Image (tube, rainbow, N blue to C red):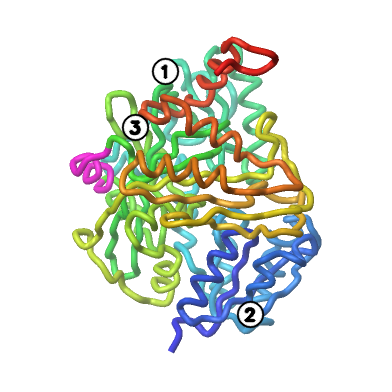
Amino acid sequence: MPLFKKILIANRGEIAVRVIRACHELGIPAAAVYSEADRNALHVRMADEAVCIGPASAAQSYLNIPAIISAAEITDSEAIHPGYGFLSENAHFVEACTASRITFIGPSAENIRTGGDKSRARQLMKRRGIPVVPGSDSPVKDEEDALKVARKIGLPIILKASAGGGGRGMRIVQDEKDLTPLYHMAQKEAFAAFGNGDMYIEKYIPEMRHIEVQILADNKGSIVYLGERDCSIQRRHQKLIEEAPYVFTNAKFRKRIGDAAIKAARALRYRNAGTIEFILDKDDQIYFMEVNTRIQVEHPVTEMITGIDIIKEQIKIAAGATLPFKQNGIKFSGHCIECRINAEDPEKFIPSPGRITLFIPPGGPGVRVDTAAYTGWTVPAHYDSLIAKLIVHGRDREEAIAKMKRSLREFAVEGIRTTIPFHLHILDHPDFISGKFNTHFLERMNRQDAQAPKTNGKAAS
């Protein structure tokens, strides 16, 4: 007998396709929702049935809670998987599912409220003895309060939205005179993105790596970590390339950061899948940063080095199953890299929606492409520009880099512009190859490119 009679996927794009595949492999029918702009989307074609929930605007479709609950009832779905983004970290949505006797495949509403509120999560971690970056213990009241905190901990600081993530509502302040305008910019952006303008402050650590730990927790109190991911290659706090494991990891480091993640999860009484994110400074000290109470875009790199299907485990846990493995039963193999392929101009990073006239993904051993794109599909302008995730697995990092470069060159996408050339440029950079980079890698690379001698209008080789 299947775990659920039917699951509704409250999302779109590659993550909706990913969840549908997991459902089908578990013998569970999958229902899809779609906006009018996604009528011909791949997830609609792959689902066993689909319901249109509104016009192109996300606010009127993928963020429309009553419409999604109605779709679940119409399709007789017993559970909803939210994917990432949209309503995946919306506690009210979890409660709406519960009130309608629909299982939410993810953490509890309280997990989302506490973990998703960065200032509350920081306070909880401090009480449990988990290192946090120095900063405000609660949201600051206004720019004057922010200035007091900044003077206390010292510049530079980073302003962060208490709610949400994805780099929105974040600003780095290097000089006191810039604090007030940057505070208002960050607050306005946070309110527009999350409906919450609360801001808190952290000491800014310039030379840092962004390391996160994937966890799984069942409803009986068992929690495991599935290793660490390095997400330091970012542009404006948006991740572009992720890899697992951390290039300089060892058994001692993995246990140290993994134990800290478990401790954080226990403090939250966490259940289902989640990610505990840390800052790693130049002295290899780790600091708790935040909790992502959902499946992450970059979850495939963890799946590739552990052999564990995280989406399937999410579904099983939501159905009441206990974890089928203990910490010492999780094995790590090889090295994995993921490149996010966006429909964007690779030089200006502006969206490039439109009709894809040719789409041929790469293949071969150790190559995985998570995508909802296909030849003839029109990339809508209404949503995130991610069209594919290219994931490769090698015996070691050197082989993974070589395999990724080969796969990127093999990846054919015509009719729109993509970030494929930009990824190739990164993978050829000596600092990336050596693993000696931090979250400022792209800024440094761009400065080097700007200073490089030119020949006939092109950079000299």
Q: Is residue 255 magenta?
A: yes
Q: Circle 3 is placed at which residue position?
A: 280
Furthest residue to the bottom? Answer: 1
Residue sitting at 61 percent across and 17 percent down? Answer: 459
Q: How many labels sit on residues?
A: 3
Gap in Å between the C-alphas at discs 3 and 1?
Answer: 23 Å
Q: Residues within 10 Å of mark 2 (few under 14, many from 20)?
A: some
Q: Mark 3 vs mark 2: which is more N-terminal?
A: 2
What secondary structure is marked by label 2? loop
Horizontal placement of 311 versus 286: left or right? right
Looking at the image, residue 446 lies above or below residue 139 = above
Residue sitting at 27 percent across and 43 percent down? Answer: 257
Looking at the image, residue 224 lies above or below residue 77 = above
What secondary structure is marked by label 1? helix
Chief secondary structure of the magenta span? helix
Image coordinates for residue 74, horizontal then vertical, percent: 69, 82
Q: Circle 1 is placed at which residue position?
A: 152
| Residue placed most toward the observer, 44 or 104 | 44
Q: Circle 2 is placed at which residue position?
A: 48
| Residue placed most toward the observer, 173 or 450 | 450
**Which stretch appears magenta?**
249-259
Gap in Å between the C-alphas at discs 3 and 2?
Answer: 44 Å
Quadrant where the C terminus is found in the figure: top right
- Label 3 or label 2, whichever lies nearer to me, is 2
Q: What's under tag 1, amino acid-wise?
A: Lys
Question: What number is the disc on residue 42?
Answer: none
Looking at the image, residue 168 lies above or below residue 276 = above
| Residue placed most toward the observer, 233 or 430 | 430
